[in-house]
């Protein structure tokens, strides 16, 4: 097997739009779970809404910035609709309601009735809405090789998308860093520990939770935009498994840390591509066909998640001492 | 906040309030000269059972009031109702003259009535100092936008931190300031929770069993804190089973049983009232019994663990 | 409160988690063993796996009789050049292209099996958009041009079934199941009009609800006793269906023994999950949230393992189409009636055990207040073990019956139902088994009756909307209790 090309694939994936999108989604989830203790099982719904919001408004002829803002607006509204009724309830309800709501978004998006708007289960092809983003690139078109990776400068899965994507990740990390050390972040952490205690100290817990849900959801939506710009908007490719992967990424990197989600995403995708590539290269196809390798990779992801919780619940960057307190 | 704890250097308001209480009849629901908290017809039922059914109760300002009664008498539920953590089936109540019925817990706390919990709620994975800072009211940096701009709240944060350190020193927790609250012993967590409640300079603190689980060696200083609190102008309402404590520091005692206020008066009189002893205190009288022992976090820990905790505390 | 107890207990038990691993592996092994002896799910399609630099244009071709069409050639032309694909034994073909863009797919009609022709010759060639990392499908239907337009829909589900860019293997087929199989088992027969149709839908809804109640009651018991929302519960339901499928179709056993084996298999899985993973986690005082995430990991592993072992196509547990029986204005299949009877009896038995027996009372005591139960001499750990075993057994049994009712099972069959089960439990009030039954009936009715006013593909969405609406009005669910503070 060709190790050089496998390593190139790994590098390409670990720095590519998928890793970027998941890093953003995991940063959002970190605000929900790591900081506030909210169990959001519908992060994929935020991503899907962001992708739809961006793609549909671009297709409708709106400029890039407006489409971006509409995507964010969709996430804000979704967070409010979810949060207003459920954030007063027990934590379990939020988990069930968010996962249900994300599925509702997907079901509606793929329903035949909305074919004209969302493209139904086929989704929206990238070519329909990528032009405004690609047109905003200051760089000249063409194939550019950096190290072993050779990509289009501006089209689809491009250098331009990576530059903007990592810029967004950096911005998100900065925001989380600033919030984490602020009194606002302190209230969120207090809510994570025990919301009644925080309520007893005169904080309007509900408002803080709502703010957290909205902010984290917005990061999810931005992740959704990145993923849609790399390929297309596909409702079924932003289903429950995406949320589960995002959780794995967050816990792998370390919840309640600034860089944990980013590191987690890079490692997650690198490892997945590596493991799949190795399986494909080392196991003869008659033992394990390539269609089986794909799900087998996710069997490993699931086991990793279990092992993480059992053996290293604080993730790679988390504070062992801090986590040990709860068990 | 940093004045030394001198129990005898009594504040004139306290003297006045105590004097005034002397003229008050010793009957349940009696009116007080300057009441801070007034409850009327507050009732809460759980599955048909009246957990709380208080016809009328006034809590005098500037003094320490003890709320006692057997397990299941409804004391904690009464606290929950007054502070907005639970909603009554009926009734109204005012605090400092303002009605608090239907007001959410956070607003109750903002209005100056701050409580602690029977089962301590230390915020485990935050440091002791962060726990304390959280208690301060009206922080600019608690706005989501302002949080990003440190200059807006840097000065206030410094003040909050200073105040937190003062209080921690008073509660002998200053050496623990950068430890996670979850690593403290049960008694220290109780102290932390009390200190945290004081960060907002409340008008009335409501302490639900502040002594439960606290190492007896710390009891004396805890009593000192509470009386000092009263002397610095804060009114105190506390639930306790430790009758020494009730006798020793309270100015007024209210007895609850089966949800109702069944007796009130000065500690000595109430606790020597044979009817109260027989009917409501029973064998609990003068024994330091922990409340709701089955629900207590501590009771789940084995005796060996308890001994360990105690040894730990003693070592400090 | 439970968590407090765990946390306290954890201070005493700082054991390493080595005990967990064998359990996890055993659990996975169990499913693997069951799966390995199963029929392999059709021959694998031509090797192509999309990644960041590759797209797989693919499709499945079936003859007008629904059999795989073998050896048919496709020519694919586009930006990356010209390629050729040939269908394999399963009628599947794929072509790997390394450049995104529009491709023209031409079916070579001369290679079609004898007697077959394209249903719509004008649809050949087809144009598809290939994005890197995806599996765009190019589907052709064979058959008489006049025949009903029902091309083999299952092929489309391979589109996006995992890809380098957005790798969610279970997602796409799941959606497929939701729209194809779903709860449509009986309502497909609901062709009548007016009252009759409504009546048929009501009956279907009640049947579906009853089976949903059986499948979900275990999750409710687990929640009640441990506070854990088990996201792998749906995959335990699938386990039952798959074991029954294997027993009947591979081992050739009669259905009744398959039902028993599936239930027993589920119980073993439940025992392994608790003994191997959750009991040690509880002993170490790991919080409920962390345990919940463990169940997510398990769900992810299990569903993908099923996919590897059984493939993505629907798996009918019994091959013959069962006879329909008319009951007044509605008609039900024999299989359905069998399922309903078993589900009804088992649910009644569960209720009886919970209400009348010592074990049942002990279980309810643990649900109410674990520390108190422990203090009054109840062995909480063994009660919870028993709850896990029966929960998984009931889920498995529910999976078989649901599979009989819906006509087939599938690797993601239970996980599609997971949300409906959660919705049922939540509606009824988390931790209240009777409420769960009511909730499930409500969900069943909503799912079926919504088809009167909404398009079929929104039936599950409508149930989830109802869930959210009910939570708005009555947050503790239909029969749930408010929580205690302080
Ligand atoms: N959330 C609740 N649900 C049901 N019963 C409750 C709840 N909270 C309190 N109770 C009941 O109300 C009564 C009063 O309890 P509580 O206020 O805790 O008493 P105390 O604090 O005086 O020991 C008890 O019988 C208790 O069991
Ligand atoms: Mg109490």
Image (cartoon, rainbow, N blue to C red):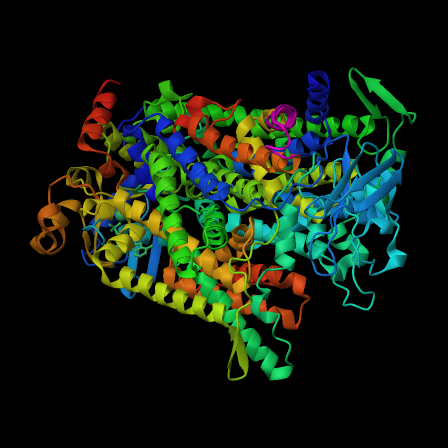
Q: Quadrant of residue A290?
A: top right
Residue A193 rendering spot, x and y as whole percentages: 44, 36
Q: Name the residue located 48 percent from the left edge and 67 percent from the top edge.
A: C335
Vertical position of residue A3 compared to residue C313: above or below: above
Residue C431 lies in the magenta stretch: no
Residue A41 rendering spot, x and y as whole percentages: 56, 44
Q: Quadrant of residue B13?
A: top left
Residue A20 can be seen, yes or no: yes
Residue A281 lies in the magenta stretch: yes
Q: Name the residue located 34 percent from the left edge and 43 percent from the top edge.
A: C271
Seen as rendered, the residue at the extreme front is C114
Residue A35 rendering spot, x and y as whole percentages: 53, 34
Vertical position of residue B197 compared to residue A74: above or below: above
Closer to the camera in the image, B124 or A239: A239
Vertical position of residue C102 compared to residue C210: above or below: above
Where does ligand 1 appear, by image quarter?
Answer: bottom left
Most common SS among magenta residues = helix
Residue A22 rendering spot, x and y as whole percentages: 65, 34
Q: Quadrant of residue C291?
A: top left
Left or right of B47, for residue B106 = right
Q: Which residues are magenta?
A: A264-289
């Amino acid at each position: 097997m060709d190790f050089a090309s496998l390593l190139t694939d790994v590098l390409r994936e670990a720095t590519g739009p998928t890793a970027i999108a998941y890093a953003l989604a995991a940063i959002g989830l970190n605000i929900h779970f790591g900081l506030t203790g909210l169990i959001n099982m519908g992060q994929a719904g935020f991503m899907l809404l962001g992708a739809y919001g961006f793609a549909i408004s671009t297709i409708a002829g709106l400029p890039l910035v407006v489409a971006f803002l509409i995507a964010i607006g969709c996430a804000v509204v979704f967070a409010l609709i979810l949060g207003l009724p459920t954030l007063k309830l027990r934590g379990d309800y939020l988990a069930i309601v968010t996962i249900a709501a994300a599925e509702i978004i997907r079901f509606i998006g793929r329903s035949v009735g909305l074919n004209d708007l969302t493209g139904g289960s086929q989704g929206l092809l990238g070519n329909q809405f990528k032009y405004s983003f690609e047109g905003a690139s200051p760089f000249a078109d063409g194939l550019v090789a950096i190290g072993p990776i050779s990509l289009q400068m501006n089209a689809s899965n491009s250098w331009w998308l990576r530059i903007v994507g990592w810029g967004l990740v950096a911005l998100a990390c900065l925001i989380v860093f600033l919030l984490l050390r602020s009194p606002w972040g302190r209230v969120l952490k207090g809510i994570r520990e025990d919301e009644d205690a925080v309520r007893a100290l005169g904080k309007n817990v509900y408002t803080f939770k709502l703010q957290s849900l909205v902010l984290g959801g917005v990061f999810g939506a931005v992740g959704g935009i990145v993923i849609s710009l790399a390929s297309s908007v596909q409702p079924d490719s932003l289903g429950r498994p995406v949320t589960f992967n995002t959780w794995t990424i967050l816990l792998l990197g370390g919840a309640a840390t600034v860089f944990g989600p980013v590191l987690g995403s890079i490692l997650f995708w690198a490892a997945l591509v590596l493991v799949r590539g190795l399986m494909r290269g080392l196991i003869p196809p008659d033992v394990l066909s390539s269609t089986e390798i794909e799900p087998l990779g996710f069997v490993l992801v699931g086991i990793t998640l279990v092992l993480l919780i059992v053996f290293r619940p604080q993730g790679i960057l988390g504070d062992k001492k801090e986590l040990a307190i709860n068990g | 906040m940093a004045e030394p704890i001198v129990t005898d250097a009594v504040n004139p308001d306290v003297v006045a309030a105590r004097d005034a209480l002397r003229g008050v009849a010793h009957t349940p629901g009696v009116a007080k000269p300057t009441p801070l908290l007034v409850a009327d017809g507050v009732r809460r039922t759980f599955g048909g059972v009246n957990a709380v059914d208080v016809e009328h109760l006034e809590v005098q300002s500037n003094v320490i009031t003890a709320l006692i009664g057997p397990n299941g008498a409804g004391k904690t539920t009464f606290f929950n109702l007054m502070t907005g953590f639970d909603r009554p089936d009926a009734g109204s109540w005012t605090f400092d003259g303002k009605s608090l019925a239907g007001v959410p817990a956070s607003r109750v706390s903002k209005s100056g009535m701050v409580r602690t919990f029977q089962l301590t709620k230390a915020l485990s994975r935050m440091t002791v100092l962060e726990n304390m800072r959280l208690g301060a009211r009206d922080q600019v940096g608690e706005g989501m936008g302002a949080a990003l701009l440190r200059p807006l709240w840097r000065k206030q944060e410094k003040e909050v931190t200073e105040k937190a350190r003062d209080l921690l020193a008073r509660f002998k927790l200053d050496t623990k300031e950068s430890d996670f609250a979850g690593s403290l012993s049960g008694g220290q967590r109780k102290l932390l929770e009390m200190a945290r409640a004081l960060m907002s300079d409340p008008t009335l603190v409501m302490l639900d069993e502040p002594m439960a689980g606290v190492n007896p060696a710390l009891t004396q200083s805890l009593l000192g804190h509470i009386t000092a609190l009263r002397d610095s102008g804060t009114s105190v309402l506390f639930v306790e089973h430790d009758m020494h404590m009730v006798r020793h520091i309270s100015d007024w005692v209210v007895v609850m049983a089966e949800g109702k206020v069944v007796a009130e008066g000065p500690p000595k009189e109430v606790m020597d009232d044979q009817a109260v002893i027989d009917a409501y205190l029973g064998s609990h009288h003068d024994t330091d019994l922990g409340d709701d022992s089955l629900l207590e976090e501590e009771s789940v820990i084995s005796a060996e663990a308890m001994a360990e905790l105690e040894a730990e505390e003693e070592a400090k | 409160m439970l968590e407090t107890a765990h946390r306290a207990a954890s201070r005493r038990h700082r054991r390493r988690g080595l005990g967990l691993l064998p359990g996890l592996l055993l659990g996975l092994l169990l499913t693997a063993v069951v799966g390995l002896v199963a029929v392999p799910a059709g021959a694998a399609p031509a090797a192509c796996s999309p990644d960041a630099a590759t797209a797989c244009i693919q499709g499945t071709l079936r003859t007008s009789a629904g059999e795989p069409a073998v050896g048919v050639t496709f020519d694919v032309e586009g930006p990356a050049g010209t390629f050729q694909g040939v269908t394999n034994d399963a009628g599947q073909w794929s072509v790997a292209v390394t450049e995104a863009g529009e491709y023209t797919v031409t079916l070579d009609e001369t290679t079609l099996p004898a007697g077959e022709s394209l249903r719509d010759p004008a649809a050949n060639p087809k144009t598809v958009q290939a994005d890197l990392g995806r599996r765009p499908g190019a589907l052709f239907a064979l058959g008489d041009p006049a025949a009903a337009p029902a091309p083999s829909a299952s092929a489309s589900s391979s589109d996006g079934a995992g890809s380098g860019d957005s790798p969610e293997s279970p997602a796409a087929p799941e959606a497929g199941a939701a729209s194809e199989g779903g709860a449509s088992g009986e309502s497909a027969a609901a062709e009548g009009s007016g009252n009759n149709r409504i009546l048929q839908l009501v009956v279907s809804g009640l049947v579906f609800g009853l089976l949903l109640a059986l499948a979900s009651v275990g999750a409710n018991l687990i929640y009640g006793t441990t506070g854990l929302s088990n996201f792998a519960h749906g995959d335990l339901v699938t386990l039952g269906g798959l074991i029954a499928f294997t027993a009947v179709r591979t081992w050739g056993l009669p259905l009744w023994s398959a039902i028993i084996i599936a239930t027993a298999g589920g119980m073993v899985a439940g025992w392994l999950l608790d003994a191997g993973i959750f009991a040690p986690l509880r002993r170490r005082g790991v919080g409920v949230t962390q345990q919940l995430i463990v169940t997510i990991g398990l769900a992810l592993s299990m569903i993908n393992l099923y996919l590897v072992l059984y493939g993505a196509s629907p798996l009918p547990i019994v091959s013959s189409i069962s006879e329909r029986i008319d009951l007044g204005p509605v008609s039900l299949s024999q299989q359905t009636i069998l399922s309903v009877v078993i589900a009804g009896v088992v649910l009644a038995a569960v209720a009886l055990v919970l209400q009348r027996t010592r074990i049942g009372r002990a279980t309810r005591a643990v649900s109410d207040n674990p520390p108190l139960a422990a203090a009054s001499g109840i062995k909480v750990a063994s009660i919870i073990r028993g709850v896990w075993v029966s929960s998984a057994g009931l889920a498995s049994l529910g999976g078989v019956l649901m599979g009989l009712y819906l006509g087939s099972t599938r690797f993601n069959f239970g996980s599609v139902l997971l949300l409906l089960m959660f919705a049922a439990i939540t509606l009824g009030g988390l931790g209240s088994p009777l409420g769960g039954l009511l909730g499930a009936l409500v969900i069943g009715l909503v799912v079926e009756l919504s088809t009167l006013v909404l398009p079929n593909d929104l039936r599950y969405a409508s149930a989830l909307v109802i869930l959210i609406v009910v939570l708005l009005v009555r947050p503790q669910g239909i029969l749930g209790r408010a929580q205690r503070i302080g």
